[in-house]
Image (cartoon, rainbow, N blue to C red):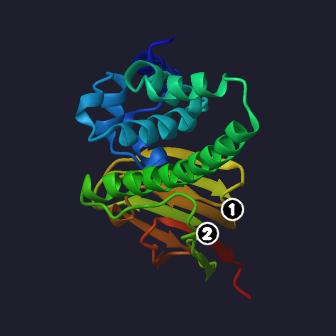
Amino acid sequence: MFDIGSSLREARTRQGLDFNEMEFRTKVRAKYLRALEEERFEQLPAHTYVKGFLRAYAEALGMDGQLYVDEYNSRYVAGDDDHLVRTRRVPPSRQTRRRGRRRESRLVAVAVTAIVLVTALVIAAWKFGGPDAPRVQGVNTDATVSTPAAQAAGVVVEATRGASFMEVRLGSRTGRPLYQGTLERGQSKSFAEARVYLSLASPRNVVVRAGGKVVKIPAGGKLTIRVRSAR
């Protein structure tokens, strides 16, 4: 057994991350992440929420999410799994094996349904936990923008309406990191690279210019900008 909350908190602080950055990475509201670290699980609506949030939080910190789910189950959802283990230890007859295969098929169906339900609950919790539009991991919302290079070459990102966490990479989402952090209102960052990938946590608070021209930001806050040399 291990301390779920303190191990999550230690991993986060060791990496120098705050709740705003972890909210952006996991798509889970910061108040729920704080509740996980303080082990105030009663503040979450159901076990399925806790398991989904634990898995997402641990994996975002580079740890084994299933290990945290198993630890939570052993401490708070004990009983059902033990019964299944004891049943499987009985020496099987032919009829028992047939029943076992049917049971395993049902368990697979239940597991698939549970995975779908957890995913839906995480999305619903994000959607109804605040005013921002939901962002779902794995959905490609990138937009590629090409703009001729002008006298004001490069890409400039400015926080005009409020703060926004921002990740900038060279060329694409898998490129070399150029910047990662929070732009406070009134701050700006410039990048001279000809092609950059931007991921913005709060795109409504930010203005992006490429080659001196304002670039339209997709609702998901992810876009690739290529500055073409003028001919």
Residue 96, horizontal then vertical, whole percent: 68, 37
Q: Residue 190 carries which label?
A: none
Q: How crowded is mark 2: few (under 14 residues within 10 Å), some or many (20 or more)?
A: many
Question: Could you say whether the residue bearing mark 1 is in a helix, strand or loop?
Answer: loop
The picture quadrant where one finds residue 138 is bottom right
Spatial distance from mark 1 to mark 2, Cα to Cα?
7 Å
Residue 134, horizontal then vertical, whole percent: 38, 62
Amino acid found under the numbered disc labelled 1: Ser
Q: Residues within 10 Å of mark 1 (few under 14, many from 20)?
A: some
Residue at image x 49%, y 56%? 116
The picture quadrant where one finds residue 140 is bottom right
Question: Could you say whether the residue bearing mark 2 is in a helix, strand or loop?
Answer: strand
Q: Answer with mark 1 or mark 2, whichever residue precedes in sequence.
A: 1
Position of 229 with respect to 74 (left or right) is right
Nearer the observer, 59 or 193: 59
Nearer the observer, 133 or 65: 65
Residue position for label 2: 224
Q: In this view, does 21 lie above or below 75?
A: below
Residue at image x 49%, y 71%? 209
Give the quarter of the figure containing the C terminus.
bottom right
Residue at image x 34%, y 64%? 133
Residue at image x 68%, y 67%? 195
Residue 70, horizontal then vertical, whole percent: 53, 26
Residue 204, horizontal then vertical, whole percent: 34, 66
Nearer the observer, 201 or 184: 201
Q: Residue 172 carries which label?
A: 1
Amino acid found under the numbered disc labelled 2: Thr
Position of 105 with respect to 46 (left or right) is right
Q: Are marks 1 and 2 in contact (CB under 8 Å)?
A: yes
